[in-house]
Amino acid sequence: MGSKRKQRPRVTEKPRPAPWSATRADAWIGLLETHKRLTRDVDAELEAAHGLTISSLELLTRLADAEDRMLKLTTLANEAGLSLSRVSRILDALERRGLVERQPSADDTRAKNAWLTAEGLKLQRSAETTFFAGVERLFFDRLSEEDLVTLARVFGPFRRNPARQT
């Protein structure tokens, strides 16, 4: 009276995709590692000097560049490539510091605007200087002019708004 074991259905494994060449792996992993390292290092510098992250500086900068230093929250989120909930959390912290204010939208009663205060503009300008200096030191100083031209040519087509290229 042997017990019958249930047979597991056979899973046919799909063939693995062909591995990347060493050049492709170096390019892809190099891109990811460079982004991760630069973001971490610049974030740390911004946090130490100004109490800001790269994302919070991006929101402040977008507001500083906007007409009347004001944008709808949905516009701010879309332009920054962040979720509305993430933008809201960042703005909570900035608002507590008196750097931004939320105001009802004059043309849409359901919408809110973020407005950059004078204090927020002052901090944005200072933090932007820190940001540019950090990226210059940690990234651009390590590249030759030829490498820089190559990177601009390679990554230019991936920019979200190519019309802003300089």
Image: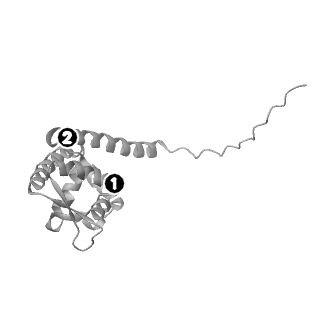
Q: First in sequence: mark 2 or mark 1?
A: 2
Q: Image height check: is 132 above or below 116?
A: above
Name of the residue lying farthest toward the top: 1
Q: Image height check: is 45 above or below 128?
A: above
Residue 159: give x, y in percent of width and height.
32, 60
88 or 54: nearer the eye? 88
What amino acid is found at the position of numbered circle 1 in the picture? Answer: Ser
Q: Quadrant of the C terminus?
A: bottom left
x 54%, y 43%: residue: 19
Name of the residue lying farthest toward the right: 1
Name of the residue lying farthest toward the bottom: 107
Q: Quadrant of the N terminus?
A: top right
What amino acid is found at the position of numbered circle 2 in the picture? Answer: Glu
User: Rounded to the nearest whole Å, what is the CA distance between mark 2 and mark 1?
Assistant: 21 Å
Quadrant of residue 110 within the rendered picture = bottom left
Q: Image height check: is 68 above or below 46?
A: below
Residue 7: give x, y in percent of width and height.
79, 36
32 or 7: nearer the eye? 7
Foreground disc of the pair 2, 1: 1
Please name the residue that numbered disc 2 is placed on.
47
Please name the residue that numbered disc 1 is placed on.
85
- Does the image show residue 82? no
The crowd level at tag 2 (other Cα within 10 Å; few <14, some 14-19, many 20+) is some
Report whether 6 appears left or right of 164.
right
Indicate the secondary structure of the residue bearing disc 2: helix
11 or 101: nearer the eye? 101
- Does the image show residue 115? yes
The crowd level at tag 1 (other Cα within 10 Å; few <14, some 14-19, many 20+) is few
Quadrant of residue 112 within the rendered picture = bottom left
